[in-house]
Amino acid sequence: TQLWDYAVMRLVWRPDAISKWFREQGIHGPSYGFLNGCNKDIRSLKEETDRLVLDVRDHKYLPRIAPHYLKWRAQYGDPFLYWHGAQARICVFNYELARQILSSKSGHFVKNDVHPNFLALVGNKLGFMEGADWVRHRRIINPVFTIDKLKMMTKTMLDFAETMVKELEHQASRNENGEKQLHISKFFSQLTVHNISHAIFGSSYELGNKVFQAQIDLLRITMEAFLDVLIPGFKYLPTERNQRRWMLERELKSLLTQIIQPRLATSEYGNDLLGVMLDSCIETKQGGKQVDLSLSMDEIIHECKQFFFAGHDTTSQLLTWSVYLLCIYPEWQEKLRKEVFKEFGRESPNPNALNKLKEMAMVLLETLRLYPPALFMQRKAVTDMTVGSIKLPKGISIVIPIPVMHRDKEVWGDDADEFNPLRFKNGITGAAKVPHGLLAFSIGPRSCIGQNFAMLEAKSTLALMLQKFSFTLSPDYVHAPVDMFTLKPKFGLPIFLRPLDKCN
Ligand code: HEM
């Protein structure tokens, strides 16, 4: 009976009550479908618009990734209420409301519930914690990203980017006229894995890469197993899949032991993320610092996973989209090249001087505005709340669609759909009618901890590429941005690289 009561309450009574709650405030939306909410509509709208292919210079891709939001906003206004299964969601487009929700320090807006499979993949730490736990973790990790530490990391970023550029030169030289079509996003993906692994594991980054590969393989096996009928004790049977899982688990443990043991033996925990976490963990155990700062081994492993997933794909997409934009706006490519040559000549960029590349910073910020790698932020109200004039009931989820807000003409001006890096000539706060217009790294206490890291990584890589090559889009490129955890070009980014000495 209890289960029945709960089902009726969650699936029938609550949707009805919530719709009424908002209707009384003049907030409407598509109606709730039993169990499915609006999911069928969303799926069919997305299937339809996924076939849209855009002109190569057209940045109006929102109908491809958010057709439901555009349709419902046109139909019901801003904000509107919709249903993700039985979960009620308010979609907010208003900057002032978004600011209040994202900057709230009251602890009344928490990260929305996340599917356990997703949590298993990305780690259930910093990005998904709340309250005292989150404060404790963020306090431990903040020192990893101080300006001094970032400067040291930039040297490594440049080394990795140089290795990537050498590989690109090698590939480009394999063609007679020095031109070869390359899927550049694959190179960026490898590069950003190296960088994030180095930030976490320092000199053990190669072992770190193997740790992440083992985790990805493990997850794949776990996902396959979800489709199996659950038979008690099945996971202990030596089936082919179970044996592979046990092997990966053993490998993972041995890799982590190889990384952690030498540090524990010498008490030299290191300056990288792992070192900082070990320091906090061990010192506390020995009766040292504040007890509430300690992290367990399990927490450390989850935290490493989280940084890996939060930091590599996002930055890889920032690089991919900025190269796409520099291909279709060759005048900007030339401008940035001149800036890099003016600052560094043909020498390897000075890690401390990357911040002098003002035009490059403008292009990267405009890339983040037009093609933000992270697309939708979600929060949940843990208690009844009022934001602006809207009364939100406890448990309601809120969606903040970043790319849609980045096209708001009232905030960004009539050219919001166009590429215009000059809008950032006075920095981020002067670029729009509101100081917090750019939401790509979010704002407020939960904003991205790795944003400076990501920007330095992108600047190092682009500077080195611009010194060596000119790049153009391949005619094979299909402009179809797609939402796959991050915003990606659906069919990759094939480009031609032409070594600069061959252009002159
Ligand atoms: C262009 C690259 C990046 C973009 C666009 C990006 C975007 C974001 C956004 C939008 C959030 C807030 C999510 C939310 O509130 O729901 C976030 C949080 C976070 N990001 Fe990034 N990120 C990038 C790179 C990185 C890097 C390089 C790292 C690590 C080195 C990183 C680590 C994190 C972490 C740990 C959080 C959670 C912070 C917290 O909850 O306190 N990100 N990021």
Image: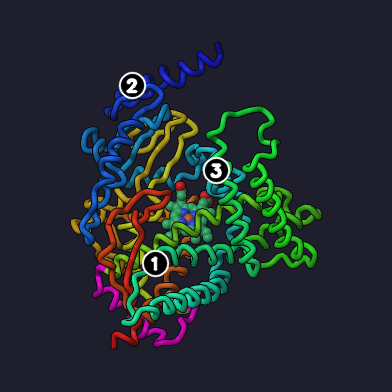
Label count reads: 3
Question: Percent from the top left, x then y, of residue 464?
Answer: 42, 78
The part of the chain drawn in magenta is: 328-352
Q: Residue at x 33, y 40 (%)?
A: 92
Residue name at image x 40 percent, y 60 percent: 317
Going 36% across and 84% down the picture, which residue do you hit? 341
Residue 294 higher or lower than 238, as above or below: below
Image height of 33 relative to 343, above or below: above
**Amino acid identity at mark 3:** Leu
* Quarter of the image that includes the N terminus: top right
**Residue that mark 3 sits on:** 119
Tell me if the residue at label 1 has its CB under 8 Å from ligand 1.
Answer: no
Q: Position of residue 374 (x, y in %)?
A: 41, 52
Please say whether residue 338 is one of the residues in the magenta stretch: yes
| Residue holding disc 2 | 20
Mark 2 burial class by Cα count in 10 Å: few <14, some 14-19, many 20+: some
